[in-house]
Amino acid sequence: MSLWEGCGGTALVTAVDGRLWRLVESQEETATMSFVDTLDEQALLESLLEDSKPPSLPGSEELHYLLKTPFRYPPLRWGSRFGRPHELGIFYGGLSVTTTLAESAYYRFLFWHSMAGEPPAPRIQSEHSLFSVRYATGQGIRLQEPPCDVHRNLIAHPADYRATQVLGSTMREAGVQAFEYPSARDPKGGTCAGLFTPQALASRKPANLEPWWCELSTGEVLFKTRERKPIHRFHLDDFLYRGKLPLPAN
């Protein structure tokens, strides 16, 4: 029996709405300014780069770039938890800041431990942007609730995405626009959300946009804001599966 059948299929589709948080690396205009001398030259470079990107999905043309970008690109070569490599991208986020940072910490560790050679420094610092956006649709699914919650071991498996990728394809085919699911990385058991389509977004611009800093080392990831509020700290041991850091969809 597939996850879709085990969860009740189309009977599970319902209205969902909420606010998700997303953490992204700060690049965009700051990055391109390092290649040019004037703002006019930067505008031209940004235009050329925009023309080289995949086309935006219909309905996303008026969205802020932070909201349209996740839909624009396909997943990495291994796909994503609910997306296969050949499918359109999914807008993922956590339903709390803590869950979002936990998911991001896993990928920071993956970056560190996937380096071909020695890391360039004992600690790597990076700048990120945290933002939120509301979503709302009548075509949604809550995979963290009954009857799907009994399948949490498959939905939130730390390494095996086969069942959830099949579920993701089936949800797309059924017209599902947004779904919520248990986080596989948050030690506190938080919830994430995924949007298949820009139509599930309830606004065109991100809210609560704020710079964050990350410090990465072999066994620890730290996140903090500019105001130096309490530091969010994640340890490598929190993400190990059978004694190793799992690769996505391995």
Image (cartoon, grey):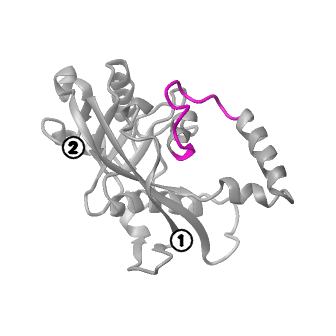
Q: Residue 233 placed where, x, y %? A: 41, 74
State whether residue 73 is above or below residue 134.
Answer: above
Q: Which residue of the protein is positioned furthest toward the left in this rendering?
A: 146
Residue occupying image coordinates x 63% and y 78%:
122
| Left or right relative to 32: residue 215 | left
The correct choice, above or below, for 67 with respect to 187 in the image is above
Q: Quadrant of the N terminus?
A: top left
- Cβ atoms under marks 2 and 1 closer than 8 Å: no
Percent coordinates x, y for residue 232 in the rendering: 40, 73
The disc placed on residue 144 is 2
Tell me where residue 234 sits by quadrant. bottom left
Identified by mark 1, the residue type is Trp
Q: Secondary structure at mark 1?
A: strand
The residue singled out by tag 1 in the image is 213
Closer to the eye: label 2 or 1: 1
Residue at 58% from the left image edge and 37% from the top image edge: 77
Q: Is residue 58 magenta?
A: yes
